[in-house]
Image: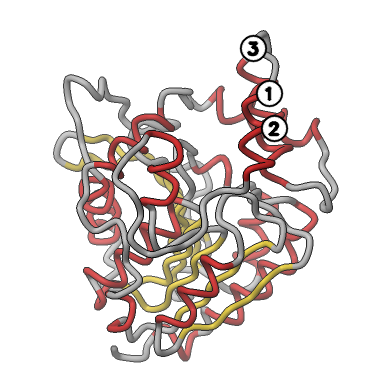
Amino acid sequence: MNSHSGQHLRLHDTDLWYEDRGSPGDPPILLLMGNGCSSAFWPEPFVGLLVRGGRRVIRFDYRDTGRSSHFDFDQAPYSLDDIERDVLGLMAHLGLPRAHCIGLSMGGFLAQRMAVRHPSSVASLTSMMSTSDYAVLLHTFSGGEAPTSGLPPPRQDWLEALSKLPAGLSPLELSVESWRLANGSRAPFDAEYWRDLQRLADTRGDDSRAGDHHRRACERITDKNLLGALRHVTAPCLFIQGSEDPIFVPAHAEAAAQAVPSGKLRIVDGMGHALNPAFFELLADALLEHTQDTVAHRRP
């Protein structure tokens, strides 16, 4: 078994923290978290399900999160291209010419982008709670250019509820309430679980500015709409979306699955935009099925 404690890797201007779990001979899974979130948000019980399922699991802290380098974005701006280079640099360091890329939210968009731009590096793609047109989110939150895909914006009721969160909430409680809203109303929500997860992320160095930095990094790329480019992706692709996701409603995954020749769609009833423990086993089973060894060694 590989080290459980994690390691640091120096890549150009960035110190990247990563953890490499499972047997080196097992199919490698690379986990890509959402905007502003460190690897702490791939919780240990979820990672354990994948490792016990016979996968080599790599999770890492994006730049500006957790135990990786933090930047003054105004002084040292970067783009999603730089985050992508971090990912490819980590894969090269680990001797992985290709890996199963599993991304959530911004990480799902990043994984799709890697499948388009670096097809030989992606053995399979799983995009969860994500979109193929990131301009939809950026336009809603920061007034970036209008999306070109026609995909629907975040739900209005969620945006209104978000705007009504009390101004006096502590950063910890603001995080918990934000997860509560993203989770949707149908799935169970254990506030103490999310509180503990956020506390763990905070002790590892998570910074509330990371979300803004990652949004600005996404604004700096020109290829925010990948729907057209997905037609050329040959890797097996799975698009998982929650029926209650208020940020990227199911139409986002439906469009992506239709765009990819080998695209598969899985709408999870009751799931929102949160990696809720209630869905760990269902999601892990889907990921293990999609990343079987026979897929890992198929040539593109």
- Density class for disc 2 (Cα within 10 Å; few <14, some 14-19, many ≥20) is few
Could you say where residue 200 lies in the image, as x and y percent from the top left? 62, 29
The picture places residue 118, in percent across and down from the top left corner, at 23, 70
- Dot 1 lies on which element? loop
Left or right of 227 on screen, residue 162 = right
Left or right side of 245 for 79:
left
- Where's the C terminus, which quadrant? bottom left
Q: Residue at x 35, y 55 (%)?
A: 147
Residue on which disc 2 sits: 161
Which residue occupies 70% across, 52% down? 45
Residue 256 location, x and y as percent? 45, 74
Considering the numbered disc 3 on the image, is that residue within a helix, a strand or a loop?
loop
Residue nearest the observer in this picture, 253 or 292: 253
The mark found on residue 40 in the picture is none
Q: Is residue 152 above or below residue 160?
A: below
Residue 232 screen position, x and y as percent: 28, 83
The quarter of the picture where residue 249 lies is: bottom right
Report, in whole angstroms, how far the alpha carbon at label 3 lies from the one at label 2.
13 Å
Residue that badge 1 annotates? 164
Whether pointer 1 and pointer 2 mark residues with C-beta atoms closer than 8 Å, the reply is yes
Q: In the drawing, does residue 79 fall left or right of residue 258?
A: left
> Which class describes the residues within 10 Å of circle 3: few (<14), some (14-19), or many (20+)?
few
Q: Amino acid at mark 3?
A: Ala
**In the image, which disc is placed on residue 167?**
3
